[in-house]
Image (spheres, rainbow, N blue to C red):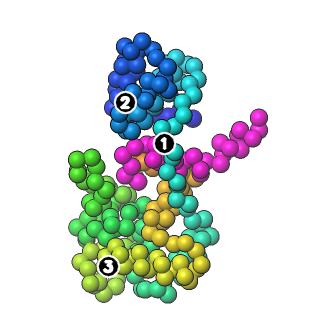
Amino acid sequence: MQQHLSSRTVREYEWYVRRWESAGFPDPAAWVEVFAGAHQRRNARAALLWHHRTNLRTPLSLEPQHALRKVPVAFTQEELHRLLKKAHMVHARCEPVLQLLYSTGARVNEAAGITPEDITSTHIILKETKRRPGGLRVERPIPLGRRSRQALADLAGMPLGRVQNVIGVRAHTVQDWCRDVSKLTEMHVHAHKLRATFCTHLLQRGVPVHEVRVLMGHTDLATTLRYAAVTDKRLASAVALL
């Protein structure tokens, strides 16, 4: 599968390739280690792999700089249905809040930061997003779908919560609810696993990975690709035919 890179990423890769060429085409593995920062080493490695694959048309094998972080295991559809069915036993708000987390891919702090003003006729605007380098926060609009609209409607029909946000509670309360649901279902339920399920289910349904990256708010496509690596069983089936 061809990976489509942004023009910015291509320019950055080309910069590393020019440095490698000006150094006299040294051994790639040794040259990558010249860089002091882990981020630069990862980018240098990615640039050389891209250059050999795209421009030189020759395979290049380079060991990863760091082992990939463990990908959170997603809920199956049956598990998701079971935990949502039990959620109403914890609190009236629990089921719609968990539905909102699943249908938007929001981090629990992002969900707790949603105010009525952040909801339009078509989107939820997530403002309490994860900070970027330099401390910058970037707002992330998430399109409303059937599940998220119903969750918002259910929450809006309830008495006002103690917190003046859409979900009516703080993030730590949602985490407490997840622990209660875990006991009821005998499954490991936590808020971030619903976000992982959102990502995994989109990829399983064939949504392009670069589109999922935008919805997840990942700064690095490689982060989203960790989910793709364990969800695209079609590729594994294709290889098995050889």
Question: What are the residue bounds of the magenta stretch?
Answer: 216-242
Which mark is nearer the camera, 3 or 2? 2
- State the mark number for residue 35: 2
**Rendered view: 28 above or below 125:** above
Q: Are marks 1 and 3 in contact (CB under 8 Å)?
A: no
Q: Amino acid at mark 2?
A: Phe
**Rendered view: 197 above or below 5:** below
| Apparent side of residue 197 relative to residue 16 in the rendered image (left or right) | right
**Residue at image x 45%, y 73%?**
98
Q: Residue 232's x, y, as percent? A: 61, 48
Which mark is nearer the camera, 1 or 3? 1
**Residue at image x 40%, y 81%?**
93
Q: Nearer the viewer, residue 144 or 18?
A: 18
**Residue at image x 37%, y 24%?**
16
Badge 2 marks a residue whose secondary structure is loop
Among numbered discs 1 and 2, the one appearing first in the sequence: 2
Q: Amino acid at mark 1?
A: His
List the residue tagged with mark 1. Answer: 66
Q: Main secondary structure of the magenta part?
A: helix
- The verdict on residue 230 being magenta is yes
Q: Nearer the viewer, residue 241 or 149?
A: 241
Q: Nearer the viewer, residue 151 or 214?
A: 214
Among numbered discs 3 and 2, the one appearing first in the sequence: 2
Badge 3 marks a residue whose secondary structure is loop
List the residue tagged with mark 3. Answer: 169
Crowding at mark 1 (Cα within 10 Å: few <14, some 14-19, many 20+) = few
Among numbered discs 1 and 3, the one appearing first in the sequence: 1
Q: Quadrant of the C terminus?
A: top right
Q: Residue 67's x, y, as percent? A: 52, 45
Q: Residue 124's x, y, as percent? A: 32, 62
Badge 1 marks a residue whose secondary structure is loop
**Rendered view: 81 above or below 226:** below
